[in-house]
Image: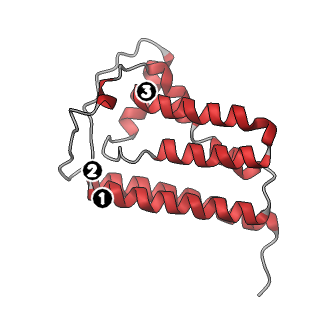
Amino acid sequence: MRALPDKAERLALFLGTAALWSLGYLATAAWNVSRPATTLDWDPVWQFPLVSAFAVPYLSAYALPFLAALSPLSRADYRRLAAAAAGVIVVSAAFFLLWPLTIARPDIGPASFSDRLLAALYAADSPVNLFPSLHVSLSFLFAAAVARARPRWRGWAIAWAALIAASTLFT
């Protein structure tokens, strides 16, 4: 059996990982919406104030996989990245199903662009798959891949992932 050309394999792995991410997150969210979920009132994470401007870095997490896919990783490194991402998604989906966590979201007035953006995010995404955070885990995974492929970008990639992680606290 002949191997796929590098670009075709990279595209297949990227699309497969994206499909698994969508399925792992959206399918468990659809299932969890009708199930009782736990709120951890004691957890200090829930005490962070809402800052709607963090909706922009939060949503930028969806750009990091593209940057990793376009990075000059070797075929073996890209395969390892796809396998690691798949593992993170599968483990996270299992947690989502076993222990659905939720949080009460505040009302958002449509005062600014970021308020409207966050309101749209809230409308599209039920708060039932909160732990572990795919935004945090996948952002750092993809940032590490970018940093491996482009060592000079390491600082920016890790800072971007850290900003995405912070955004999960403020949105």
Residue ID for mark 3: 118
For the residue pair 15 and 154, the one nearer the viewer reads as: 154
Q: Residues within 10 Å of mark 3 (few under 14, many from 20)?
A: many
Answer with mark 3 or mark 1, whichever residue precedes in sequence. 1
Left or right: 134 in relation to 41: right
Residue 18 visible (yes or no): yes
The quarter holding residue 85 reads: bottom right
Q: Amino acid at mark 1?
A: Leu
Q: Residue at x 38, y 41 (%)?
A: 125
Q: Position of residue 83 (x, y in %)?
A: 60, 65
Q: Which residue type does callout 2 highlight?
A: Pro
Q: Which quadrant would residue 41 be assigned to in this image?
A: top left
Residue drawn at point x = 47 percent, y = 26 percent: 117
115 vs 21: above or below: above
Tell me if label 1 and label 2 are in contact, CB under 8 Å: yes
Q: Is residue 78 above or below residue 138?
A: below
Judged from the image, the secondary structure of the residue bearing numbered disc 3 is helix
Which x, y percent locates residue 68?
70, 48
Mark 3 touching mark 1, by CB under 8 A?
A: no
Residues marked 3 and 2 touching at CB (< 8 Å): no
Which quadrant is home to the N terminus? bottom right
Q: At label 3, which amino acid type do we have?
A: Leu
Q: Earlier in the sequence, mark 3 or mark 2?
A: 2
Where residue 168 appears, as percent x and y from the top left, is: 44, 33
In the picture provided, is 132 more to the left or to the right than 104?
right
Q: CA distance from mark 1 to mark 2?
A: 6 Å
The residue tagged 1 is: 97
